[in-house]
Amino acid sequence: MLDKDYFSLEGKKGMVLGIANEHSIAYGCARACRALGAELAITYLNDKARPFVEPCAKAVDAELFLPCDVTKPGELEALFDAIRARWGRLDFAIHSIAFAPREDLHGRLVDSSAAGFGLAVDVSAHSFLRMARLAEPLMTDGGSLFAMTFQGAERVVKTYNLMGPVKAALEAAVRYVAAELGPKEIRAFAVSPGPLPTRAASGLKDFDELVEEARTKSLLGRLATPDDVGALVALLATRTGAMLTGQTIYVDGGYHIKG
């Protein structure tokens, strides 16, 4: 028999990586998880980003608010050390970061530099694996891991360029993490919204055209919002999602099924 605990995160501890400001997908996830009762650790990229993220952390009563730049050796590890010291465990972790050098992102994929491609994969995909490795020993009663992706991972999307194969690598990483950590009841998901007008997405070439195409193709006639994404992530982190893992889950109003 179902009870309210199936739809609750009361007493659960979660980490959110990637809030840039109040419009971030990661912030939508943090709000939704907090609304279901979760206690949160929130990160900010650096001192320049902190003033934009700190109000978000305060709004969700974050118990931990720490810097984390995954390109800086030791910062991700320091974050998990702080989580271990404060809570001794972790129930869910949300990865919502991506980066590619502008010159590589705006050019043809075949012209991308090895350094730019490598950096994009490191920040956007491999850091998810690092997060999973650090989260694993803290998820002693199981848990859930989330990564943000986009349909450009599986079909050619105009102007998505370099990030297409990078997100494809991320989605494959999610599937393999789900397989490797499943015996410990640690689940993994790739969440795929359509294009959202966030700070990170604004770096894509001709992004406005991509947004308008998604709006036109959405079966529901609108784009997803960070709160739409957050609601799904929060639900999957509860007992309701206990038998789901390894999937790429779309939150795009049906955009992805139209050619």
Image (cartoon, rainbow, N blue to C red):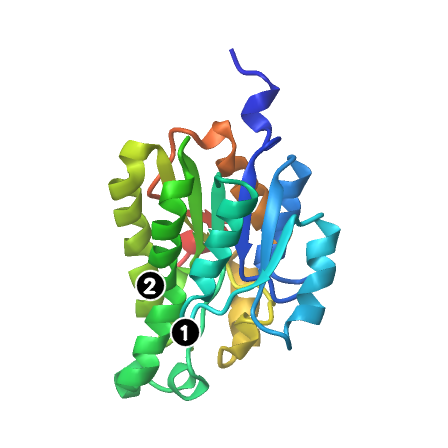
List x then y, in percent, for residue 16.
55, 53
Residue at the (51%, 80%) spot, across then down:
206
For the residue labelled by badge 2, is the local secondary structure a helix, a strand or a loop?
A: helix
Depth order, front residue of 213/81? 81
Looking at the rendered structure, the kind of residue marked 2 is His
Sequence-earlier tag: 2 or 1: 2
List x then y, in percent, for residue 227.
64, 50
Residue at the (49%, 28%) spot, across then down:
240
Looking at the rendered structure, the kind of residue marked 1 is Tyr
- The reply to whether residue 221 is in sight is no
Residue at the (30%, 84%) spot, across then down:
115
Q: Is residue 142 left or right of residue 10?
A: left
Q: Is residue 256 left or right of residue 60?
A: left
Task: Report which quarter residue 52 is drawn in.
Answer: bottom right
Depth order, front residue of 203/42? 42
Above or below, 2 relative to 55 = above
The quarter in which the C terminus is drawn is bottom left
Pointer 2 and pointer 1: residues touching (CB < 8 Å)? no
Task: Report which quarter residue 120 is drawn in.
Answer: bottom left
Q: Label 2, on which residue? A: 126
Residue at the (54%, 71%) spot, across then down:
200
For the residue labelled by badge 1, is the local secondary structure a helix, a strand or a loop?
A: loop
- The reply to whether residue 190 is in sight is yes
Q: Residues within 10 Å of mark 1 (few under 14, many from 20)?
A: many
List x then y, in percent, for residue 5.
58, 22
Above or below, 169 relative to 72 = above
Q: Label 1, on which residue? A: 160
